[in-house]
Image (tube, rainbow, N blue to C red):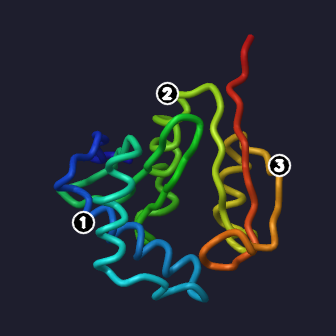
Amino acid sequence: MAGTSLRRLDAGDMPAAAIVHRKSFDVRLPWLAGLHTPDEDRGYWSGHLFKTCKIWGAERDGKLLGVIAFQKDWIDQLYILPEAQGQGIGSILLDIAKAAHTELRLWTFQRNAEARRFYEARGFAAIKETDGAGNEEKEPDVLYRWVRETF
């Protein structure tokens, strides 16, 4: 993570956030690649996520490497560029959301084994699986939940 900085993103960062999302999504889930156009991705990040979520990014040398979008008790999006994965960026972004909430939930696809391992290693537990009928992609998914431990 050396040389990586974190900051809350603003409206002008949303096109770059959409690119991080799409590149990561398409590499990890190639059977779903091309589901949306770049314009649709930008519109979703600028028009929906920016208005409803806190969005943080990790960058190095002026390049956005990862993004997290979260709101009360939910992580809506967490994406790291494929070439930046495995460097701790996802963990540090996830920690921002964990610090802000005592409980978090998120969805991921059942076939996304890397994401499932990532979340489970960071204290998330699967609480529900679906056949995908309720999501846009029609892809079986899994709901995860994390609760802050209290001592």
Q: Earlier in the sequence, mark 3 or mark 1?
A: 1
- Which quadrant of the figure has residue 21? bottom left
Mark 1, residues whose alpha carbon is within 10 Å: few (<14), some, or many (≥20)? some
Between the residue at mark 3 and the residue at mark 2, the CA separation in whole angstroms equals: 22 Å
Amino acid of disc 2: Ala
Locate residue 23: give its quadrant. Answer: bottom left
User: Which residue lies at the image location 81% right of the left edge and 66% below the top edge?
Assistant: 130
**As shown in the figure, which amino acid type bears the numbered disc 1?**
Pro
* Numbered label attached to residue 70: none
Q: Is residue 107 left or right of residue 43?
A: right
Q: Where does the image place residue 132, in percent across and percent down from the top left?
A: 74, 73
* Residue 30 percent location from the top left of the image: 56, 86
Distance of label 1 from label 2 (alpha carbons): 25 Å
In the displayed structure, would residue 72 be above or below residue 148? below
The amino acid type found where label 3 is placed reads Ile
From the viewer's perspective, is 48 left or right of 26?
A: left
- Residue under numbered circle 1: 15
Rounded to the nearest angstrom, the CA distance separating label 3 from label 1 is: 33 Å
Badge 2: how crowded within 10 Å, few (<14), some, or many (20+)?
A: few
Q: Secondary structure at mark 3?
A: strand
Q: Callout 1: helix, strand or loop?
A: helix
- Residue 32 or residue 44, whichever sits in front: 44
Disc 3 designates what residue? 127
Q: Residue at x 33, y 49 (%)?
A: 57
- The residue drawn where x is 55% and y is 47% is 75
Pointer 2: what residue?
A: 100
